[in-house]
Amino acid sequence: MRETRIYLVMITVLLTAIGVVMIFSASSIYAWERLGNSTYYLKRHLLFLLIGLVMALLAMSIDYRILRRLSKPLLLISFLSLLLLFVPGIGREIAGARRWYRWFGFSFQPSELAKLAIIIYLADFVSRKENKINDFWQFFLPAMLVLGAFCLLILAQPDLGTTVALLVITFIMLFVAGIRMSYLGLVLLSVIPVLYVLILSAPYRRSRITAFLNPWADPKGAGFQIIQSQIALGSGGFLGVGLGRSMQKLFYLPAAHTDFIFSIIGEELGLLGAASVILLFIIFLFQAAKIARASVDSFGYFLCVGIITMLAFEAVVNIAVSLGCIPTKGLPLPFISYGGSSLVFDMIGVGLLLNVSRFKEI
């Protein structure tokens, strides 16, 4: 496991280093124009990275099995933090969405905590009730009630992308646990019409779908972002236009340093650079899977499965959105995109993976 841990740490360092360089490249001109400080986003990202590193070291240093006793309190704290967002004067509303707390100039997104809390709770729940995995009333229904309560609060923000992420994480963990497929199929059949209604009920979601299907139907409106993303990727060629020489970051591509940073990577570093980032994620997930397989107990195993699913889903969705393969979702690219809460909890996830692998040798 020592070699696996070294690989995992090295890849995480490489991905975060790429993130630091690309965030400065993608945001410096925007930050100078809007804020008069070209290093504004870089400095904040480095601070979040430092916080994430400290939290990862803490997550790695404790006995991860302690989290079993803390799973329910952590779940409750996470639920209350989501609930308090809707209290006037506490939650921060930005562009019609109430997803953040803001203290001393910094924002915190409790839905990121919710993802980790759900993973820890399900890992404990599954490991405690492995002999009742196919009992609808004692296992499946309680798990779905917990998931449903969190999804309702996150949907109310509104945040459909994180809701879908929670569904995927939960379903993958239950699938790996060996739950009866008919149970998951029943939930999927009930979720599909709900998603259909949610998409139709929100004009901005409908526009995302139409833009995905045909972005050139509205090139200056709903389709603008995905068109600019594809132009960035196509402009890069095999070797890229050169680090720092992106044209799309010059106020053409919105969210260049956050949701669409992969497009800037493709433009500046080319197909070679973009493929290298994808390869690093694949190697990361392969090493994390080795840790899961070698875990000493079922709790550690399912904890790893949940974290791997979370990071893999975020990476796949972000890259797919940049390529125009799926509608825009607003999920960051792990370790690379600018975003305080997501980066910190991704780093905590890495710390927990290293923690599980460390106890293999004790």
Image (cartoon, rainbow, N blue to C red):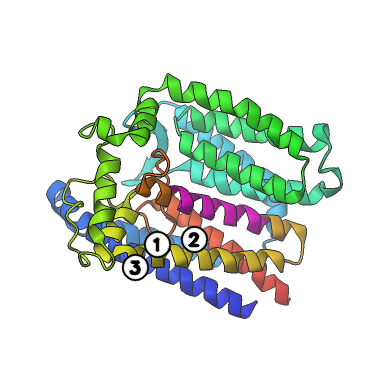
Which mark's residue is nearer the viewer, 3 or 1?
A: 3
The disc at residue 49 is 1
Q: Quadrant of the N terminus?
A: bottom right
Q: CA distance from mark 3 to mark 2?
A: 26 Å
Residue 22, can we see it?
yes
Q: Judge whether 94 appears above or below 65 on screen.
A: above
Magenta part, dominant SS: helix
* Residue range (magenta): 303-317
Q: Secondary structure at mark 2?
A: helix
Task: Determine if the magenta segment contains residue 312.
Answer: yes
As rendered, which of 159 and 186 lies closer to the eye? 186
Report the side of 92 relative to 123 (left or right): left
Query: Is 85 covered by the magenta stretch?
Result: no
When asked about the image quadrant of residue 6, the answer is: bottom right
Judged left or right of residue 180, residue 316 is left
Mark 2: few/some/many CA within 10 Å (<14, 14-19, 20+): many
Q: Residue at x 71, y 77 (%)?
A: 361
Pointer 1 local density, CA inside 10 Å: few below 14, some 14–19, many at least 20: many
Disc 3 designates what residue? 272
Q: Amino acid at mark 2?
A: Met
Secondary element under disc 1, as helix, strand or loop, is helix
Q: In the shown orientation, is residue 251 left or right of residue 347?
A: left
Using the numbered discs, state the Cα–Cα distance from disc 1 to disc 2 in whole angstroms.
8 Å
Residue at image location 58% in from the left, 66% down from the top:
286
